[in-house]
Image: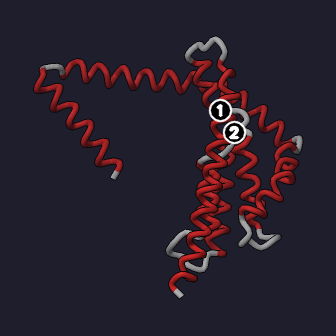
Amino acid sequence: MVNWIWLFFIVTGFIVSAVQGNVEAVTQAAFDGAKSGVTVCFGLISVLVFWLGIMRIAEDAGLLSKLAVLLRPVVRFLFPSIPKDHPALGYIMSNMSANILGLGNAATPMGIKAMQELQKLNPDKDSASPAMCTLLALNTASITLIPTTLIAIRMNYNSVNPAEIVGTTLLATAISTAAAILVDRWYRRKQTLIPTTRG
């Protein structure tokens, strides 16, 4: 569906530019956008490599495992349906730890593994379980201490103080995480009340 939407925008843009006689402007904008995208990507590489290296050192030093230990009570509260020693809990804690430290690249495979383990516990294989919905909500709205990618983009565009967004990002992601948890709890409560009401 998204592909069709983008195709509609592109085709509409070309038609409108042809009607107005500005096809050259559209072509130039397309090339400028592609050039800018490549430039930004190359500019991000050095900064991202640096931050990922720092985070890898923190991971090897045991920071992620210590953070996972701190997260264990929170994870047990958020995912009460998962058995105590199930592998899914380890993947969920690793995913949350990586997201908190701004390691999106490391968080993604852990999130996928967690989903695979949660699917094994899911009684209805055709729909997501409440635990899977909770994980998706947390992964999407995760609190972030160090917004590595945004800092890298700001550095690439010569920001005077690229790290000044750390405080506001922390506040915004804390609010989004709290909102995700509250909505998730509300939907869970609603789901548990539906069978009782029908009975």
Kindly report the distance in space between the C-alpha atoms of the residues bearing marks 2 and 1. 7 Å
Q: Which mark is residue 12?
A: none
- The answer to whether marks 2 and 1 mark residues whose Cβ atoms lie closer than 8 Å is yes
Q: Position of residue 139 (x, y in %)?
A: 63, 51
In the picture, which quadrant includes the C terminus? bottom right
Q: Amino acid at mark 1?
A: Thr
Specify whether 195 is left or right of 185. Answer: left
Residue at the left extreme of this rendering: 19
Q: Which mark is residue 169?
A: 1
Query: For residue 46, what is the image quadrant?
Result: top right
Q: Quick check: 10 above or below 127?
A: above
- Category of crowding for the residue at label 2, using alpha-carbon neighbours closer than 10 angstroms: few (below 14), some (14–19), many (at least 20): many
Specify whether 19 is left or right of 163. Answer: left
Q: Secondary structure at mark 1?
A: helix
Q: Earlier in the sequence, mark 2 or mark 1?
A: 2
Q: Position of residue 85 (x, y in %)?
A: 82, 70
Q: Quick check: 48 above or below 187?
A: above
Q: Secondary structure at mark 2?
A: loop
Query: Which residue is disc 2 drawn over?
Result: 144
Query: For residue 36, what is the image quadrant?
Result: top left
Look at 69% across and 39% down and name the residue there. Answer: 144
Look at 39% across and 26% down and name the residue there. Answer: 34
The answer to which of 140 and 106 lies nearer the viewer is: 140
The answer to which of 65 and 192 lies nearer the viewer is: 192
Look at 65% across and 47% down and name the residue there. Answer: 177
Q: Position of residue 126 (x, y in %)?
A: 50, 75
Q: Position of residue 174 (x, y in %)?
A: 68, 41
Query: For residue 12, what is the image quadrant?
Result: top left
